Image: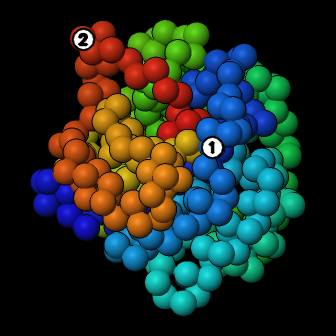
Amino acid sequence: MLDGFGRKIDYLRISVTDRCNFRCQYCMSEKMTFMPKSELLTLEEITLIAERFIGHGVKKIRLTGGEPLVRRDMSDVIQRLGRKVKSGELEELTLTTNGSLLEEYADHLAEHNVRRINVSMDTLDPDKFAEITRGADVHQVLSGISAARQAGISVKINMVALRDFNQDALMPMAEYCAKNGHDLTVIETMPLGDVGADRKLEHISAEEFIAPLSDQYSVSPIGHKSAGPARYMAVEPLGLRLGMITPLSNNFCDNCNRLRLTTDGKIFMCLGHNAHVDLRAAVRNEGIEAVDRLLQKALKLKPLRHDFNAQLDGSAEILERHMNVTGG
């Protein structure tokens, strides 16, 4: 699949639910209103649509949310898509999770060809972790990560950079990741949804955020690539592979290879735009074959780049939808 700018699209991110058992402050408001269940894609619809996308050339699928593992019967989706990895139709099935349910799911994920996962964890400090998540327990996440590694799953830690909140958490996190063989990715905040905070106050560039590492260690670019937009660096002699996702300070849209399927069945061509096509209504009214027609429309609508910078400085309206709806 090629979009209107000649970019090859082979990566699909699927938000299987907008619900989450955490309430991270940069992701959602404290009292979220979630979608009625009748508006959500069924798990059967999710797998059928995913299989259709695989037929059109998608090679990598990431399951996201919300927290994907809070949805009932997620094990069935993982099992069904995992078969596509085993058959060679899909190169990779991955998951982004807050880690809280990994002890329960780790063996199932490994059994069904999930070889690596991303775990969102912004600090190791129990009190600060509880503050940013509005009440979660970091030890539960750490136990889940341990279970995943014991099951043979590679773990990458995603750390959102927040000015004057977790800058002092970077060094302990980097040392934890290096010691345990995890990659670490630092992610700049993105202006999505009303979360009751001033986005400008919390934003810090990834380069500024990692300054303590650069002061103490040698940080140099490396050629490692993943399916996502991260640029990777080696941190030596710590022995850490560090990724940076920089939507505001260093745009990466030229090489975008992604489409996003939301929990209510919309295909968003870009995280930073509202342009979309509605698969749910079409599939329910016309059948799964409707995906073929709408997919071609989606590819033509994919924009050249996002508008996060304009949204952050106030010259463009911040998108109303929250990250948990579109998927991380």
Taking depth in this image into account, of 209 and 279 the one nearest to the observer is 279
Nearer to us of marks 1 and 2 is 1
Marks 1 and 2, the one that precedes in the sequence: 1
- Using the rendered view, name the quadrant where residue 165 is placed: top right
Q: Residue at x 49, y 26 (%)?
A: 321
Can residue 112 be seen?
A: yes
Front position in the image: 36 or 14: 36
Amino acid type indicated by mark 2 = Ser
Q: Position of residue 39 (x, y in %)?
A: 62, 38
Which residue type does callout 1 highlight? Leu
- Can residue 142 be seen in this snapshot? no
Q: In the figure, is residue 62 to the left or right of 127?
A: left
Q: Going by the picture, which residue comes out furthest to the bottom?
A: 87
Please tell me whether residue 8 is drawn above or below residue 326 in the rendered image.
below
From the viewer's perspective, tell me whether residue 93 is left or right of residue 69.
Answer: left
Pick whichever, 223 or 281, lies toward us: 281
Q: Residues within 10 Å of mark 2 (few under 14, many from 20)?
A: few
Quadrant housing residue 44: bottom right
Q: To which quarter of the image does residue 180 belong?
A: bottom right
Residue receiving disc 2:
315
- Category of crowding for the residue at label 1, using alpha-carbon neighbours closer than 10 angstroms: few (below 14), some (14–19), many (at least 20): some
Dot 1 corresponds to which residue?
A: 40
Q: Which secondary structure, mark 2?
A: loop
| 300 horizontally vs 243: left or right | left
Quadrant containing the N terminus in the rendered view: bottom left
Q: Residue at x 74, y 68 (%)?
A: 76
Residue pictured at 71% horizontal, 17% vertical: 30
Q: Residue at x 46, y 84 (%)?
A: 89
